[in-house]
């Protein structure tokens, strides 16, 4: 049994927000589950996590296009150097150059280096070997990162992937297969630099590998972004945390979504674990809090009955290799009432995140409509997005939207499509459409 | 004890027992030779099988006529309720001392024709057979109830010292769970029950201790039930027997109804009932006047509920419906002691008086702290209008941290005949609102077998739909036997 008193292992707490009351015959139970981890890597700052050190692989796109403009390659080198500088001593790391093949640049012997003054200096010297020449086959990059990270006993396994173009030199199926092979083995933050990359490819990688996706339109901003990403990774205290959901006989999980800090649908990621229970991966955790929206469809019941619709628990892996264990749990209940006011009330957290999920969908659909030339559809959807962003206080998204549409009346959702939209602005909006804000409490 | 009440005069000079004929003093209650009850020997006029109340006779409150279509009887203020002692005298303005009847009973001298006179100490059954007929009384019908100001209560000299409470307490929460098969779900009978009280297979909540509770003493019984439409029982009760200084018994019942729109209503009602029952159980043996004790008990219960707001509690559904609402509940309590019937309440839980002789009028003893009652009282609406409003059942008084002002209502009565006090939550009275309805649904033998009668009342509410939690406590009342306090 692990020692939970270790300061670097986060303590998890689970809070359930729901209106448990259903009308006679009601079946759908909605709940927002807030998972908060405290006392993890960032506050401990000891440099080592529960089961050993962290390992990080930095994958830099070295396709020919990185030379147009040359600032992209320069920015990538500077960003990688900054990331290496941010690594805590003792962290295992490697740098990979990605083209139509993946090439280990440092340390280059198929292993990971251990961060220290000497290895950092060597790594930065090696960055000169990052030269733009070749194609783009991201699946091969991910498989090499997996091989490097899988060769060591690491508590946290993470990759940072930078690309500037489309995945042109392998089939979408090959990338899909690589993502499936890597899912659950390491986490990955994905970044697109410039505006020649495919938003759905980058967000798809981050989503599959439980990391973040973002755009760095100006290569000069790469160093700051890489530093922030690396600090985030260094703050992780525990990896492979899963959300376990138990549901009773006859109940069905309609969806399980992460809704904060960003929307990510986990419904299809279920791994059955024993009778009526399944685990949903959440990746690695530092000191942070995330919200999940769960909808359970339970068998209809009569007024006055009460049942447990779902039991939510956090599952942590045992560093000693034993069975994963639940560390904290919350209950989602269903209570049938004849009181219409109680049964129809919507929990504010549930309402808020339902709105945030709709916001993300509206942006996606609006931009898709705009690309396909459907101006009316785009106007309607983006207008709805403006309205939702304003109502929920999602100021960042509202600002991004205002670069794509002229807002006439935010409260009513009346907008006009801008005649000219900078490509970077549209890609930024699309990439960040899933970012949510939390309920003002 | 020390105080000997003035015995009544029956006007006899010789024992009417044909086989005795011993000379008796007009103030004697019993024949010194054969023990014949002299007070029960005055013949009724022939053919009169029901007592006719003379103008000045004791009048137990009549249930006012119902307005057509009305849901409620007219509300009465405690001070307006006519009430007299067993002799038809006005109740003293100052509360009655409990170490001996302060108001000397005039002594009913009537007995139904042909009814053999029972001993004065006969139980409720014997008493029930003897509806009193008023003798001519002094003071007439102009009377008032003991002022419900408990501060005026007279403290009794606890000469006898506090007596141990042999009856003990029966707080509702003490009830052990029923005979559910250990650890197996009652809904699907397949899964085991987890530590949170849900089935590991079908998820159904398991019956809880509070879903159905019963307690019984010889002189008081109570039943509480979850009902059919609520997922948990937010009512609670506490009943007990106590012993007054001097050894006379007292019966205590407290019933509370948690306010569903607040946080943790079940905890609020449990805390209030437990606290009020304990305070009464402690105060009565010390000789505190029951009305004063009732006032103190309600204040203490209010403090207990208020204190809940300061503790966290574990509400697994912190939904917006209860946005910051402090735990709250209603309370109604009754003490039957020494010929006195005391009620106290806050909120819309009620106490009813049902005479054993069902031909005598029943009465509601409490006045709801409810929106409808306030409207009617203020003369802003008639009953039909007030109770037709959706706000009718909103309560205007409750125990809890967010109560505007705690106004415990208490009232004392001296019924002149045996009967049963029905102490209940709206889960029952919604199905027997008028006093005469309550009298009709209360089993005839309620005074003798209070627990089965309480079950029958709960059954009545369940048959009616059981839309709310149902809690009822029954306290049989026996008027003090003639001559009580003298022996």
Image (cartoon, coloured by chain):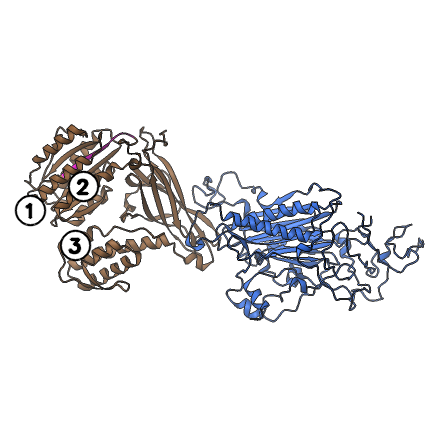
Q: Nearer the viewer, residue B439 or B132?
A: B132
Q: Residues within 10 Å of mark 3 (few under 14, many from 20)?
A: some
> How far across and how far down the image is residue B101, in percent?
77, 53
Q: Residues within 10 Å of mark 2 (few under 14, many from 20)?
A: many
Residue B52 lies, with reference to residue B169, above or below; the image says below
Image position of B425 (left or right of A249):
right
Q: Nearer the viewer, residue A293 or B146?
A: B146
Image position of B57 (left or right of B432):
right
Q: CA distance from mark 3 to mark 2?
A: 21 Å
Identify the chain drawn in brown: A
* Mark with earlier residue (3, 2): 2
Q: Which residue is mark 3?
A: A425
* Label 1 with label 2: CB-CB less than 8 Å: no
Hue used for the chain lettered B = blue
Q: Report the disc number at residue A69.
A: 1
Q: Report the disc number at residue A41.
A: none
Provide the chain ID for the residue under circle 2.
Answer: A
> How far across and how far down the image is residue B5, in percent?
82, 53
């Amino acid at each position: 049994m692990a020692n939970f008193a270790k300061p670097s292992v986060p303590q998890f707490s689970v809070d359930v927000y729901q209106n448990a009351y259903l009308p006679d015959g009601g079946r759908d139970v909605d709940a927002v589950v807030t998972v908060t981890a405290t006392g993890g890597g960032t506050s401990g700052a000891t440099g080592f996590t529960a089961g050993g050190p962290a390992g990080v692989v930095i994958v830099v796109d070295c396709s020919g296009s990185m030379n147009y403009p040359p600032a992209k390659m320069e920015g990538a080198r500077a960003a990688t150097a900054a990331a290496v500088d941010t690594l805590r001593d003792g962290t295992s790391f490697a740098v990979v150059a990605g083209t139509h093949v993946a090439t280990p640049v440092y340390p280059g012997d198929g292993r990971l280096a251990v961060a220290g003054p000497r290895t950092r200096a060597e790594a930065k010297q090696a960055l000169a070997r990052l030269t733009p020449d070749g194609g783009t086959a991201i699946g091969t990059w991910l498989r090499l990162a997996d091989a490097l990270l899988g060769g060591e006993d690491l508590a946290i396994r993470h990759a940072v992937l930078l690309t500037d173009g489309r995945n042109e030199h392998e089939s979408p199926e090959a990338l899909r297969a690589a993502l499936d092979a890597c899912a659950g083995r390491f986490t990955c933050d994905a970044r697109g630099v410039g505006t020649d990359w495919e938003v759905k490819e980058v967000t798809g990688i981050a989503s599959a590998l439980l990391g973040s996706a973002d755009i760095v339109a100006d290569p000069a901003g790469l160093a700051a972004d890489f530093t922030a990403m690396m600090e985030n990774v260094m703050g992780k205290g525990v990896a492979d945390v899963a959300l376990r959901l138990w549901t009773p006989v006859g109940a069905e999980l309609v969806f399980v979504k992460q809704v904060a800090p960003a929307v990510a649908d986990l419904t299809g990621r279920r791994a059955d674990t024993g009778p009526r229970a399944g685990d949903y991966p959440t990746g690695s955790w530092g000191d942070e809090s995330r919200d999940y929206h769960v909808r359970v469809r339970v068998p209809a019941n009569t007024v006055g009955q009460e049942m447990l619709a779902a039991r939510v628990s956090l599952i942590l892996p045992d560093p000693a290799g034993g069975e994963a264990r639940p560390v904290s749990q919350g209950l989602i209940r269903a209570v049938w009432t004849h009181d219409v006011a109680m049964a129809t009330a919507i929990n504010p957290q549930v309402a808020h995140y339902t709105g945030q999920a709709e916001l993300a969908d509206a942006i996606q659909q609006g931009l898709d409509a705009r690309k396909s030339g459907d101006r009316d559809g785009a106007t309607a959807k983006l207008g709805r997005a403006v309205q939702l962003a304003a109502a929920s206080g999602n100021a960042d998204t509202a600002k991004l939207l205002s670069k794509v549409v002229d807002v006439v009346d935010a409260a009513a959702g009346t907008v006009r499509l801008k005649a000219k939209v900078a490509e970077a602005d549209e890609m930024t909006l699309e990439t960040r459409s899933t970012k949510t804000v939390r309920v003002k409490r | 004890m020390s105080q000997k009440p003035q015995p009544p005069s029956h006007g006899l000079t010789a024992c009417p027992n044909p086989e005795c004929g011993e000379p008796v003093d007009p103030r004697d209650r019993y024949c010194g030779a054969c023990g014949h009850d002299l007070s029960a020997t005055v013949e009724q006029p022939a053919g009169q099988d029901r007592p006719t109340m003379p103008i000045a006779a004791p009048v137990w409150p009549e249930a006012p006529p119902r307005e057509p279509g009305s849901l409620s009887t007219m509300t009465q203020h405690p001070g307006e309720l006519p009430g007299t002692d067993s002799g038809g005298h006005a109740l003293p303005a100052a509360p009655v001392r409990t170490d001996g009847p302060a108001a000397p009973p005039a002594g009913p001298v009537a007995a139904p024709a042909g009814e053999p006179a029972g001993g004065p100490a006969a139980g409720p059954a014997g008493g029930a057979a003897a509806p009193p007929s008023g003798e001519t009384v002094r003071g007439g019908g102009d009377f008032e109830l003991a002022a419900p100001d408990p501060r005026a209560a007279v403290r009794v000299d606890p000469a006898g010292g506090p007596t141990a409470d042999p009856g003990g307490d029966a707080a509702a929460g003490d009830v052990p769970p029923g005979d559910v098969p250990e650890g197996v779900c009652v809904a699907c009978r397949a899964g085991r029950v987890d530590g949170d009280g849900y089935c590991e297979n079908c998820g159904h909540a398991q019956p809880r201790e509070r879903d159905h509770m019963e307690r019984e003493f010889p002189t008081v019984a109570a039943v509480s039930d979850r009902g059919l439409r609520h997922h948990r029982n937010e009512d609670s009760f506490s009943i007990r027997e106590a012993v007054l200084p001097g050894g006379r018994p007292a019966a205590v019942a407290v019933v509370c109804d948690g306010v569903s729109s607040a946080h943790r209503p079940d905890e609020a009602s449990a805390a209030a009932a437990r606290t009020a029952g304990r305070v009464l159980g402690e105060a009565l043996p010390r000789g505190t006047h029951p009305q004063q004790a009732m006032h103190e008990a309600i204040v203490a219960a209010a403090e207990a509920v208020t204190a809940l707001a300061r503790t966290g509690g574990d509400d697994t559904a912190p939904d917006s419906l209860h946005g910051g609402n402090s735990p709250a509940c209603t309370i109604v309590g009754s003490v039957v002691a020494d010929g006195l019937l005391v009620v106290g309440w806050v909120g819309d839980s009620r106490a009813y008086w049902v005479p054993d002789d069902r031909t005598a009028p029943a009465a509601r003893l409490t006045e709801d702290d409810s929106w409808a009652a306030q409207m009617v009282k203020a003369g802003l609406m008639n009953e039909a209008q007030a109770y037709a409003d959706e706000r009718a059942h909103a309560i205007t008084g409750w125990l809890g941290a967010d109560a505007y002002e705690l106004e415990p209502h208490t009232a004392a009565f001296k019924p002149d005949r045996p009967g049963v006090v029905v102490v209940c939550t709206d889960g029952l009275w919604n199905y027997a609102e008028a006093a005469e309805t309550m009298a009709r649904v209360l089993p005839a033998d309620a005074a003798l077998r209070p627990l089965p009668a309480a079950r029958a009342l709960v059954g009545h509410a369940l048959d009616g739909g059981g839309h709310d939690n149902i809690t009822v406590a029954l306290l049989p009342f026996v008027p003090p036997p003639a001559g009580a306090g003298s022996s």
